[in-house]
Image (tube, rainbow, N blue to C red):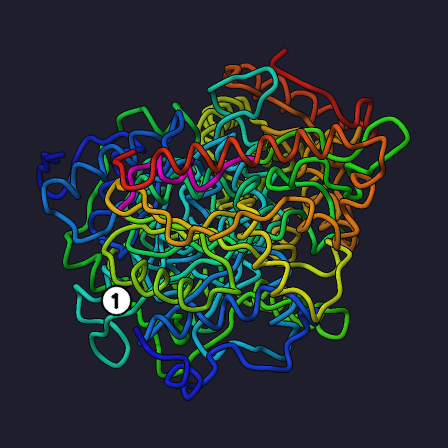
């Protein structure tokens, strides 16, 4: 894997000057992944922050061929670009001669966990050679912080508001990485931008492996989390150190936890700085906090039990 | 599937003929999802793929929404792309139809016309393609298996024409045309290849050395300008349809214009009708002509873009016209073809009386006697100059 120094010397394939919010987790994730490709890349993006923020006509932040067509179909769109690539390569019709091109689809949690799940599942099952990367910021942030199936327990969003009677989102989040792994694809992983080395290594691996690969990446969102832009990477790290967002990979069916915190931090430390969980810190909601912590503990233990095993 | 040909002729269903045309065109990519009554197109095409008769990448996706998304992805990557669907399948593609045309991608889709739910019904009407009439796709309608086969081959050239660059939908009637066997004249593979030529997309996502951003976000500063260009391209496509039809006729002898007139020139009353039901109407015309009634048929072949001038010119001297729609706009004011045709006749100095009749929804039979009854009504309208019922359902 390239060193940080080497990586920093590479050209940015996603330029500055885009219109994503300061402190947004998406640009560093995309840049790390594009760097990890180490060669020609074609990308697509589901409708969402990344698409809107990078391509307001007549500007584009992308220095690679890029397409957006709709919200729920990033995987379907990309799967056929990849198919066209194979068909045209076979016919010797690829512009500029044969090249080893990597294909990446980017989607947020709304576009991946919810509306895009069917297209993702279909593309994984068909075995296209591509990486699907989900940047999971835990809600429909682009349209104003609405609840998605990735939204954390009890989170306050505009469609699951913490009210007088109902304290935020009532359901545990969907475990998309497990759902994806159940497609028996060669590689699936969870990563976080605070750990650039782990994220880069996983992206390199995902792009090297033949067949469909998947990465689910924690993406801090100051707007929807009600946090300070300058703290984003800190809270990404804490999501991992509290074991809310474990870093692991599943390669050829073997699960491996790639980072185990020396000291597992209490969940409260991650929740406290985020405005979306403010209501959980009220004394009368202590039971909710305990419930949340218990569920995180349970999921982490489940993962520990599977570590190193074929799942 | 092996096709038995005698002197270039073969007995084929509409679906088989479409699949065979696709085999001869040999597109780069074909994303597909099965739906009655178009399923056989994809099944037979799949056997061409399995037998190595084509080099197409056939990908069986998990929904029609993904099928059209996949068409968009592949076309954006510079591939020649074709698919087929019907009814709910086209309805599920609806969002993507607009994106395909807005991105100016020359995708070819065969729509085997079928009614839309509810209630669910697998038989023919035109609600599906009429629902997509404002989606920016060129729409060609075909009466027969021969015409559907010839249209699909022409559609490739129309879509890819430099002045057009728009997706094309070829429509034929579900079951009536898709499943009925007709003796048709086939072209040779070489003739088809020679006619469609090789496709070289000007802009492609796979041109790594010249990266492009496609599908960017467009604000009020420029969205309307894109749509203006698209609208102009749609208007221009009428010329491309005629140009391609002209070349087709020169090479293969079969003539196709923007519409077909049957005993129309000296007709005083006429029925305007799409697709297979025109055949039934022609039989009625022949019967009535024997009795001295000057009846005729106009069958639009091109519905998008709407050939306003040509249709108005063809009908300007008629006394009474009935537009028979196999779809209802559910607007309380007749079917979609009626509305547009009546509007097209507004500027004609001596406007004919024009009435709307909705027929045959969900595969309800439309018989010669039904056509004759409409002509009888038209005769009364022509004689009296009075319209009693502007719009109504028939065949009920």
- Image quarter where the N terminus of chain A lies is bottom left
Q: Residue at x 22, y 52 (%)?
A: B56
Q: Nearer the viewer, residue B2 or A160?
A: A160
- Residue receiving disc 1: B197
Image vertical order of residue B222 relative to residue A178, above or below: below
- In the image, residue A167 lies at what x, y percent? 80, 32
Q: Is residue A235 left or right of residue A311?
A: right
Asked whether A177 falls inside the magenta stretch, the response is yes
Q: Quadrant of residue A231?
A: bottom right
- Asked which secondary structure carries label 1, the reply is loop
Can the viewer see residue B151? Answer: no
Q: Is residue A122 above or below residue A107?
A: above
Residue B16, position as x, y percentages in the image: 25, 34
Determine which quarter of the picture holds residue A33. Answer: bottom left
Residue drawn at (25%, 32%) of the image:
B43
Q: Chain of mark 1?
A: B
Quarter of the figure with the C terminus of chain A: top left
Q: Which residues are magenta?
A: A174-186
From the top left corner, tell me how far across and down residue B235 is, in percent. Answer: 60, 64
Q: Residue furthest bottom?
A: A9
> Residue B101 in the image: x percent, y percent?
54, 58
Residue B254 shown left or right of residue B268 in the figure: left
B9 left or right of A224 in image: left
Name the residue at 25% across, 68% down. B198
Residue situated furthest right in the rendering: A164
């Amino acid at each position: 894997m390239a060193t940080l120094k080497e990586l920093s010397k590479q050209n940015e394939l996603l330029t500055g000057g885009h219109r994503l919010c300061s402190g947004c987790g998406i640009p560093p994730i995309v840049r790390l992944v594009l760097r990890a490709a180490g060669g020609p890349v074609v990308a697509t993006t589901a409708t969402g922050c990344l698409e809107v923020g990078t391509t307001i006509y007549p500007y584009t932040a992308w220095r690679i061929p890029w397409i957006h067509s709709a919200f729920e179909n990033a995987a379907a769109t990309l799967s056929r670009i990849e198919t066209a690539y194979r068909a045209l390569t076979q016919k010797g019709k690829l512009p500029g001669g044969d090249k080893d091109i990597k294909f990446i689809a980017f989607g947020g949690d709304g576009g991946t966990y919810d509306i895009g799940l069917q297209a993702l599942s279909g593309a994984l099952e068909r075995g296209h050679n591509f990486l699907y990367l989900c940047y999971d910021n835990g809600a429909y942030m682009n349209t104003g912080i609405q609840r998605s199936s990735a939204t954390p327990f009890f989170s306050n969003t505009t469609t699951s508001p913490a009210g007088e009677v109902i304290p935020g989102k009532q359901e545990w989040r969907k475990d998309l990485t497990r759902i994806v792994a159940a497609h028996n694809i060669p590689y699936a992983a969870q990563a976080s931008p605070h750990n650039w080395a782990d994220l880069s290594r996983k992206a390199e691996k995902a792009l090297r492996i033949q067949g469909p690969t998947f990465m689910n990446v924690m993406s801090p969102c100051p707007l929807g989390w009600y946090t300070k832009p300058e703290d984003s990477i800190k809270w990404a790290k804490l999501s991992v150190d509290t074991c809310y967002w474990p870093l692991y990979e599943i390669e050829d069916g073997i699960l491996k936890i790639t980072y185990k915190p020396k000291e597992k931090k209490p969940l409260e430390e991650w929740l406290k700085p985020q405005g979306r969980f403010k209501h959980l810190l009220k004394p009368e909601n202590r039971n909710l906090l305990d419930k949340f912590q218990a569920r995180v503990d349970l999921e982490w233990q489940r993962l520990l039990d599977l570590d190193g095993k074929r799942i | 599937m092996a096709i038995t040909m005698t002197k270039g002729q073969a007995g084929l269903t509409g679906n088989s003929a479409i699949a065979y045309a696709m085999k001869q065109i040999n597109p780069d990519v074909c994303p597909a999802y099965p739906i009655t009554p178009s399923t056989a197109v994809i099944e037979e095409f799949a056997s061409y793929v399995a037998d190595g008769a084509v080099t197409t990448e056939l990908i069986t996706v998990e929904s029609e929404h993904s099928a059209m998304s996949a068409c968009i992805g592949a076309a954006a990557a510079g591939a020649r792309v074709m698919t087929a669907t019907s009814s709910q399948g086209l309805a599920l593609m609806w969002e993507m139809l607009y994106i395909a045309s807005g991105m100016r991608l020359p995708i070819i889709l065969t729509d085997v016309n079928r009614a839309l739910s509810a209630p669910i019904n697998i038989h023919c009407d035109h609600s599906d393609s009429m629902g997509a009439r404002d989606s920016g796709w060129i729409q060609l309608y075909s009466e027969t298996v021969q015409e559907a086969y010839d249209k699909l081959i022409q559609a490739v050239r129309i879509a890819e024409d430099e002045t057009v660059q728009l997706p094309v939908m070829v429509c034929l009637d579900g079951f009536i045309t898709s499943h009925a066997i007709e003796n048709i004249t086939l072209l040779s593979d070489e003739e088809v290849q020679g006619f469609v030529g090789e496709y070289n997309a000007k802009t492609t996502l796979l041109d790594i050395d010249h990266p492009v951003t496609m599908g960017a976000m467009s604000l009020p500063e420029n969205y309307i300008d894109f749509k203006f260009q698209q609208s102009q391209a749609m208007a221009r496509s009428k010329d491309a349809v005629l140009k391609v039809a002209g070349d087709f006729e020169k090479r293969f002898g079969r003539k196709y214009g923007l519409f077909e007139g049957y005993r129309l020139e000296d007709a005083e009353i006429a029925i305007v009708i799409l697709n297979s039901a025109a055949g039934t109407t022609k039989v009625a015309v022949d019967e009535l002509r024997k009795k001295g009634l000057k009846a005729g048929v106009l069958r639009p072949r091109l519905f998008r873009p709407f050939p306003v001038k040509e249709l108005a010119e063809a009908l300007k001297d008629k006394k009474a016209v009935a537009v028979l729609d196999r779809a209802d706009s559910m607007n309380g004011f007749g079917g979609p073809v009626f509305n547009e045709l009546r509007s097209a006749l507004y500027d004609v100095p001596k406007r004919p009386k024009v009435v709307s009749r909705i027929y045959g929804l969900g595969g309800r039979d439309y018989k010669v006697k039904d056509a004759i009854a409409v002509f009888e009504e038209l005769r009364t309208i022509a004689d009296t100059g009075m319209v009693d019922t502007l719009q109504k359902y028939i065949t009920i």
